[in-house]
Amino acid sequence: MNLRDAFESAFGTAPDGVWAAPGRVNLIGEHTDYNDGFVLPLALPQGVVAAASTRSDGLLRMASLQAEGRIEVPVDTLTPGSVTGWAAYVAGTVWSLRAAGHEVGGMDILVDGDVPLGAGLSSSAALECSTALAATELHDLAIEPSTLARLAQKAENDFVGMPCGIMDQSASLLCVRDHALFLDTRTLQTEQVPLDLGADGLALLVIDTRAPHRLVDGEYAARRRTCEEAAAALGVPALRDIEPDHLKGALDRLPDEVARRRVRHVVTEDARVLQTVTLLRAGSTREIGPLLTASHESLRDDYEVTVPELDTAVDAALSAGALGARMTGGGFGGCVIALVEADAIEVVAGRVADTFAASGFAAPAPFVAQASAGARRLV
Ligand code: GLA
């Protein structure tokens, strides 16, 4: 059944419109977004499609083709924690818009997603951003995409309770086909950096390691807290303000070894994003490979957010000839990306699968990422 028909059978009328918002992979710039730093994500073809209509009775009714049942809640009773599970991302976005003073009333909304869940590919941001776009267009609200990204992030931070940064929602709303989004998470300034890998004979292989991934737990929040405490101890607003040239001096002033490692990751990762953007602007795409691999090593050794499946996938991809490879997203499971020659996709994916089998890991799920369009109205 297509989404419009499914909407009619769920809610009894045709939807007023249909909106799509993508998931993302991050090329480089990991755990930098809550340090006011730089990120470089691209949108995936996979995402969430939301069919929606307004209602006059103030009720928010939510259904998903991936879940049983229907969840109903009056919009004026929405409070953090009042809705849980997948619907929290939808309800939280409506709550966030209303909390910012936007007049969003009742809605029927049916979502359908094809972003692998829990794989670190931002299925939650896709849910938030498709809802945000549907709600704003249905209520004739003119909100800048970067402001909308902040409101979607607030839904996740304050309604769902995951203290994420601004990368995923920005990627979902702002990405452009065949480009990576260079985002300064402090100023929200963006640059669309051309990324037509196929034209260069390259491919970006995404390998879902299927290692169970849970970010709504203490580890992500703990990393964020350590960074904020370190910035305060160093007397800067955020770790973004530490220049690579001053890193050694900054580390010498931090008594705690764990904090030193976290700071080193963030400062060097910001520098790697800038170097990657410079190379891409110059058309030197192959040369970004070592920066990707260095990012992984830093996330593994200094930031300590990898798991054996991620490290094994990166090592196997590199040993099969990948130009560079790294974990992508928050870590603790999820996906690895590998920059590969287009004619080496099978070899690299095969080597990772064989190595996983030999290591007793679940079979990984590889696919090639196409830099795709950000959120938009479909119908
Ligand atoms: C998750 C968060 C993002 C970002 C990444 C790590 O995806 O949602 O805001 O912090 O982790 O780079």
Image (spheres, helix red, strand yellow):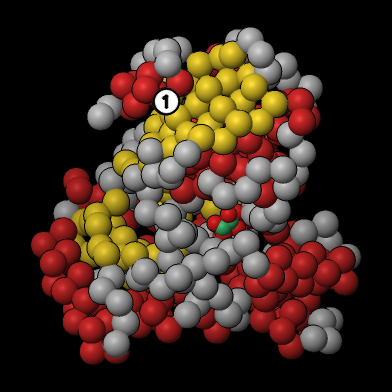
Left/right of residue 260 with respect to residue 300 in the rendered view: right
- Give the number of marks: 1
| Residue 329 makes an appearance in the image | yes
Q: Quadrant of residue 90?
A: top right
- Residue placed most toward the observer, 4 or 248: 4
Q: Position of residue 282 (x, y in %)?
A: 36, 50
| Residue 194 makes an appearance in the image | no
Left/right of residue 367 with respect to residue 271 in the rendered view: left
Secondary structure beneath label 1 = helix
Q: Quadrant of residue 243?
A: bottom right
Q: Label 1: how many residues lie within 10 Å, few (<14), some (14-19) or many (20+)?
A: some
- Which residue is at a point 38% across and 38% down the rendered structure image? 65
Q: Quadrant of the C terminus?
A: top left
- Residue placed most toward the observer, 257 or 75: 75
Left/right of residue 315 with respect to residue 269 in the rendered view: left
- Which residue is at a point 70% across and 26% down the rendered structure image? 75
Three-letter amino acid code at the position of disc 1: Ala
- Which residue is at a point 64% across and 22% down the rendered structure image? 59
Above or below, 268 relative to 51: below
Above or below, 297 relative to 102: below
Q: Position of residue 142 (x, y in %)?
A: 63, 15
Q: Quadrant of residue 20?
A: top left
Q: Quadrant of the N terminus?
A: top left
* Disc 1 residue: CB within 8 Å of ligand 1: no
Q: Position of residue 97 (x, y in %)?
A: 70, 28
- Which residue is at a point 58% across and 20% down the rendered structure image? 107
Q: Ligand 1 falls in which quarter?
A: bottom right
- Residue placed most toward the observer, 59 or 275: 59
Above or below, 124 relative to 309: above
Kindly identify which residue carries mark 1: 10
